[in-house]
Image: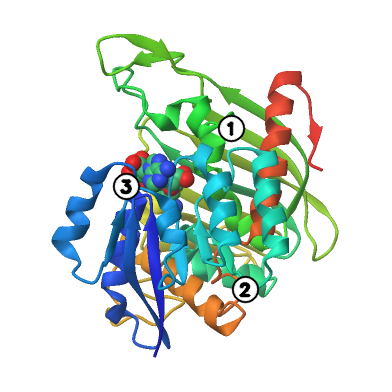
Amino acid sequence: MKTIRFAIIGCGLMGKEFASAAARWCHLPDMRVRQVVVAVCDTNECMFTWFRDNFSHIKQYTTDYREILSNETVDAVYCPVPHNLHERLYCDTISAGKHLMGEKPFGIDRPANEAILEVMKANPDVFVRCSSEFPFIPAVQRLCGMIEREEFGDLIEVNSGFMHSSDLDTTKPINWKRMIASNGEYGCLGDLGMHACHVPFRAGWSPKNVRAILSDLVPERPDGKGGIVPCETWDNATLFCETVNPVDGKTFPWTMKTQRIAPGEKDTWYLEVIGMKKCARYSSKNTNAIEILDYTLSREQAWQRIDMGHETAFKSITGGIFEFGFSDSILQMWAAFLYELVEGKPLKKFAGCVTPDETALSHRLFTAALQSQREKTTVPVE
Ligand SMILES: NC(=O)c1ccc[n+]([C@@H]2O[C@H](COP(=O)([O-])OP(=O)(O)OC[C@H]3O[C@@H](n4cnc5c(N)ncnc54)[C@H](O)[C@@H]3O)[C@@H](O)[C@H]2O)c1
């Protein structure tokens, strides 16, 4: 069993999710590679307490990420930090020869993303991917298999999105994810967009142009210290894209929504593919189920609802009938990262983490969306 020694730079929400996933690697009996977290870094030392309480194998705790990069026992780095830090930390990590799992949006804006990809070119032996766990949900894997086998026929339309309502509470104090300086001009697109793009991009569905409508529904928020400050980031985004299907070169409409203010939605990711032969839809509201309409079986307009259980890309010890959850998708995503790092290719087309080229396409799309909002017109994605 090969071991990859990891460091985490950024010990917040996602840093902890990774450490926890690494700790239950025994869930994946077929993996020929495992990971162990040996070092962590955060500028806020309070974040270390949970790691010290739970992991005896972490040897290095530091507030300076450069000490992680000069640690020769570290093979790879997971770096979930605010978006304004992606460019510097990701470029430095790659230049130090450490494999990198970055976070979306993989650069606060398009120039930052391009700078990261430039450094990658100069370091071709470093394996770099971006996190996105939703395609690993069993129902989504099933849907992706249908895409791969071209079962949908001519595409009529595709809808994907990620919606939550944590910002519906206007008294919620501002944080870095609501400030342009740290979150970026993309706002909700930078935060949530990759979740809605990963499967369409992997399918090769390439947006030619976009008409975007972005909403700033809550223009100011409490600063948490008794004052009120501007809240400049876009809360909600709807993107309407003319999209090319590489299978037949025809175009179809892809509508993508990312919303932080979507009443009734706690944390809903969805994907719907409507084709001439078959249709399929998934929503994390009913995470165990996929709905399929097969027009070739009977001529009825009948949706079939299939319970998925634990039909995962990477074999798990969990019984096949048991439901799948968020932390399971994180574990599967990490299996995909490690598998591709060691084997040189993903287990299958849709069981791979987001590639740097896919992040570049997301930046081209989101940058065009900002222009579309400004100019109130359709903008080419180039
Ligand atoms: N894949 C997902 O589902 C998912 C979910 C949430 C967030 N994210 C992404 O993960 C990244 C981090 O988000 P989060 O929710 O974990 O944020 P967070 O605020 O919970 O954690 C970020 C951590 O980074 C630390 N930090 C800041 N500057 C640092 C520096 N210079 N060196 C080391 N540590 C530093 C902060 O102290 C904090 O502990 C973002 O890119 C975000 O978009 C991904």
* Kind of residue sitting beneath label 2: Lys
* SS type, badge 2: loop
Q: Nearer the viewer, residue 241 or 186?
A: 186
Residue 129: quarter of image:
bottom right
The circle drawn on residue 186 is 1
* SS type, badge 1: loop
For mark 2, what is the residue? 349
Residue 308: image location, x then y, percent: 39, 70
Residue 117: image location, x then y, percent: 69, 55
Measured in 3D between alpha carbons, the distance from the residue under mark 2 to the one under mark 1, in whole angstroms, is 28 Å
Q: How many marks?
A: 3
Q: How is the image coloured?
A: rainbow
Q: How would you rate the neighbour count of disc 3 (Cα within 10 Å): few for under 14, some for 14-19, many for 20 or more?
A: some
For the N terminus, which image quadrant?
bottom left
For mark 3, what is the residue? 12
The circle drawn on residue 220 is none
Residue occupying image coordinates x 82% and y 43%: 382
Residue 237: quarter of image:
top right
Residue 148: quarter of image:
bottom right
* Kind of residue sitting beneath label 3: Gly
Residue occupying image coordinates x 79% and y 30%: 378
The reply to whether the residue tagged 3 has its Cβ within 8 angstroms of ligand 1 is: yes
Measured in 3D between alpha carbons, the distance from the residue under mark 1 to the one under mark 3, in whole angstroms, is 22 Å
Q: Nearer the viewer, residue 187 or 59?
A: 59
